[in-house]
Amino acid sequence: MEERKSPEYTLELLADRSCVKEIVKAILHTIFFHRYFTALTPTTHDLFDITLPVVSDVELETLIDQRATTLSRHFEISPYSNPNASDQQGGRGQVVVQFMEKKRRKGWFGGKADDELVWESWVLDVTLATPRTDTEVVKARRAMENSLQRTALKIINIVNRDRNHIPPITTNETNPFPYQILVNPKNEGWGRGMGIF
């Protein structure tokens, strides 16, 4: 049987250095709100006069905060942290969210092992805005608001449209699907040092 490729959804975000952490957290919470299959108490957070959902799970909130902080630090130490940098675009960063299902497979000598197969991925491509004048700051803020709203609506459209690939829940665990959040995944891992990626 041929294995299906899991869907990967790419979301484009614009953020300046002062808001990148909050914007990334807001979008990650929005994704998890629609893909975290446990009982939730609905909570909201306002950012740029846009009300967005928040998953009120301490473990998940901590992980989201850690990954957003990691991305924010990436922008602080990037070559674009210098205000005199020549590139108008600023820097770029990426956050990848992967949802997995556990598949039991038979191992050698009758043993069994669990494989974690990705059933859905979300890629957040974050572009750092670097406004230099007051006029550029106003334009950047408006662009960030539009980017945040457009991205939140895109998530809602995707989760309402694409449901057939979600695997059946076959366990009574609190969260039936493991997940991971990676920051700049092409910069991580053993392949980077060898020049593979």
Image (cartoon, rainbow, N blue to C red):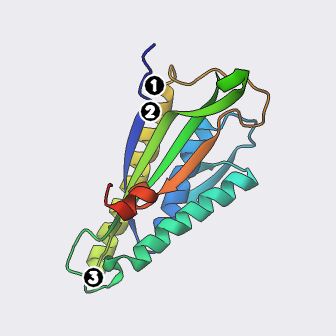
Q: Position of residue 148 (x, y in %)?
A: 43, 53
Query: Of the residues shown, which amino acid type is indicated by label 2?
Result: Asn
Q: What label does residue 82 carry, if any?
A: none
Tell me which numbered mark, 1 or 3, is placed earlier along the sequence. 3
Q: Position of residue 186 (x, y in %)?
A: 39, 56
Task: Give the CA separation, mark 1 to mark 2.
Answer: 6 Å
Residue where numbered disc 1 is placed:
161
Callouts 3 and 2 close, C-beta under 8 Å: no
Q: Secondary structure at mark 1?
A: helix
Q: Quadrant of the C terminus?
A: bottom left
Task: Give the CA separation, mark 1 to mark 3.
Answer: 41 Å
Q: Nearer the viewer, residue 97 or 155?
A: 97
Q: Secondary structure at mark 3?
A: loop
User: How many other residues sit within 10 Å of disc 2, few (<14), some (14-19) or many (≥20)?
Assistant: few
Residue 142 visible somewhere in the drawing: yes
Q: Nearer the viewer, residue 91 or 25?
A: 91
Query: Of the residues shown, which amino acid type is indicated by label 1?
Result: Arg
Q: Is residue 152 left or right of residue 194?
A: right
